[in-house]
Image (cartoon, helix red, strand yellow):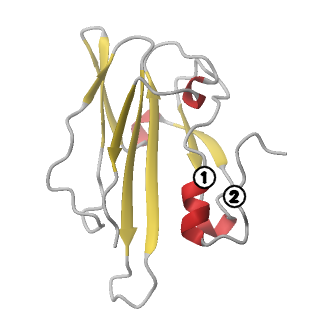
Amino acid sequence: MPPWPRSDVTAGPAARRNAAPVGFALPQPESASAHVIRMHERDGFEPYDAQEDRNEVDVQLREAGGGLRVLPRVEPLFALPPRPRRPPAVRLGPGQWVRWQLNYRFSSMAGMQDWSYWLDTFNIAYGPADADVFLSTPTVFVDEQGPLR
């Protein structure tokens, strides 16, 4: 049995998406790369993990003055909800971590396909971290989710 909660397979896509976990254990706590987990509705939100170059992840990280400045990028300008004013970057000290969530809704260019939904959850720790750090309560939580109707 997997270590994360499983959703009811008879529930609708939104219920399954909302039941998906937002934190996972790190395979290598001292890794210089990013541990990325992707889950898709087409796969029943089964988590697939990979190691990726930190520069490929859509988040700005800047180390200065003994801290880390964190600000996720919002790339898809055509996605909903609109974000006219975003929260400021978060500054983390050693041993701290942030969970930042953003959501999106997309349509086909011609409007001929159903809407698709996307939730980005960035769990970022500064300094050495235990493998289970992202299973605990974050030092800072930023909920940048907007209405998608």
Residue beneath disc 2: 7
Where's residue 125, x and y in %? 46, 23
Residue at 38 percent of width and 72 percent of height: 106
Residue beneath disc 1: 20
C-alpha gap between disc 1 and disc 2: 7 Å
> Helix, strand or loop at disc 2?
loop
Residue at 46 percent of width and 27 percent of height: 138
Q: Quadrant of residue 13?
A: bottom right
> Quick one: label 2, few (<14), some, or many (20+) residues within 10 Å?
some
Height in image: 17 above or below 27?
below
Q: Nearer the viewer, residue 109 or 136?
A: 136
Where's residue 142, x and y in %? 34, 38
Residue at 61 percent of width and 72 percent of height: 12
Q: Is residue 34 left or right of residue 144?
A: right
Q: Amino acid at mark 2?
A: Ser
Height in image: 106 above or below 88?
below
- Sequence order check: which comes first, mark 1 or mark 2? 2
| Quadrant where the image shows the N terminus | top right
Q: Is residue 139 left or right of residue 25?
A: left
Q: Is residue 114 left or right of residue 84?
A: right
| Quadrant where the image shows the C terminus | bottom left
Residue at 30 percent of width and 67 percent of height: 79
Residue lying at the far right of the rendered structure? 1
Q: Are marks 1 and 2 in contact (CB under 8 Å)?
A: yes
Circle count: 2
Height in image: 22 above or below 116?
above
Where's residue 105, x and y in %? 37, 68
> Quick one: label 1, few (<14), some, or many (20+) residues within 10 Å?
some
> Helix, strand or loop at disc 1?
loop
Q: Amino acid at mark 1?
A: Ala
Q: Quadrant of residue 52?
A: top right
